[in-house]
């Protein structure tokens, strides 16, 4: 499985999603590669930190530019799963990743500025499907408020549902401290202590829509 985590806006949680998906897949016994296509290098730092903690390791390589699709195709012969963490912006990396990905995950915050960027990505995914008809794409609302009176998430869900080529996930990921602290430590959220069961449940739901199966292990 090749998974591309993409977005036009920065700060939406792409690296959080990428590293948690890759780490959970590794803990489940799969041979996983993270392709860090974000020049900030956060996924690379995560993999390095993980390797120093005795946790299930995840290989990470950096790759940028027009050769991304070709490189991912080559590496897919050696790894069971590849997760591509792509930086923000309308980039060659997004174009290349969509040509080879089986799944595209687009985290967005439930704000107008984030949601407005989805029109362009909807068009990009439609173009990619011409050559890559197996591509499936989901928007996942991320960093949503835990306040039950907050109406932004519902409004964002309604706006996103207007996209023609992107599905809207039937769950949201809340703004939780455990996500912010786990990634710099090289962990997935199920490995972080004290345990945050709600965060673990949210990542399990993301795992299921990406890989089509339940997450059978939390690295305990």
Image (spheres, helix red, strand yellow):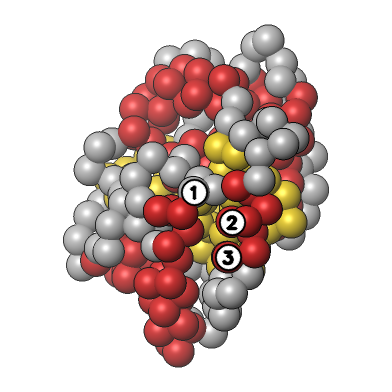
Residue 220 to residue 84: above or below = above
Identify the image quadrant of residue 95: bottom left
Q: Are the residues at dot 1 and dot 2 in contact (C-beta closer than 8 Å)?
A: yes
Whether residue 87 sits left or right of residue 106 in the image: it is left
Q: CA distance from mark 3 to mark 1?
A: 10 Å
Say which element carries label 3.
Answer: helix
Q: Residue at x 43, y 72 (%)?
A: 119
- The dot on residue 159 is 3
- The dot on residue 44 is none
- Quadrant containing the N terminus is bottom right
- Is any atom of residue 204 visible in this view? yes
**First along the sequence among labels 3 and 1:** 1
Q: Position of residue 183 (x, y in %)?
A: 48, 26
Query: Closer to the camera, 105 or 148?
Result: 148
Q: Position of residue 161 (x, y in %)?
A: 63, 69
Query: Closer to the camera, 207 or 201?
Result: 201
Q: Are the residues at dot 3 and dot 1 in contact (C-beta closer than 8 Å)?
A: no
- The dot on residue 156 is 2
Residue under numbered circle 1: 111
Q: Position of residue 59 (x, y in %)?
A: 42, 38
Q: Residue at x 26, y 52 (%)?
A: 63
**First along the sequence among labels 1 and 2:** 1
Whether residue 77 sits left or right of residue 55 in the image: it is left
């Amino acid at each position: 499985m090749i998974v591309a985590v993409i977005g036009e806006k920065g700060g939406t949680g792409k690296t959080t999603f990428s590293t948690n998906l890759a780490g959970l897949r590794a803990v489940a016994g799969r041979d996983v590669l993270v392709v860090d296509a974000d020049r900030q290098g956060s996924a690379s730092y995560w993999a390095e930190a993980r390797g120093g903690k005795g946790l299930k390791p995840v290989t990470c390589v950096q790759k940028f530019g027009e050769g991304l699709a070709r490189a991912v195709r080559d590496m897919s012969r050696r790894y069971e799963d590849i997760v591509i963490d792509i930086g923000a912006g309308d980039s060659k990396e997004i174009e290349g990743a969509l040509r080879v990905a089986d799944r595209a995950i687009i985290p967005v915050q439930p704000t107008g500025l984030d949601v407005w960027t989805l029109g362009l990505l909807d068009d990009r995914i439609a173009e990619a499907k011409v050559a890559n008809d197996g591509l499936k794409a989901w928007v996942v609302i991320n960093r949503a408020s835990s306040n039950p009176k907050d109406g932004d998430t519902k409004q964002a869900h309604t706006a996103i549902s207007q996209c023609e080529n992107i599905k809207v996930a039937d769950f949201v990921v809340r703004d939780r401290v455990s996500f912010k602290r786990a990634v710099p430590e090289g962990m997935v959220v199920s490995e972080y202590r004290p345990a945050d069961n709600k965060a673990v449940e949210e990542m399990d739901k993301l795992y299921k829509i990406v890989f089509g199966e339940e997450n059978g292990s939390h690295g305990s």
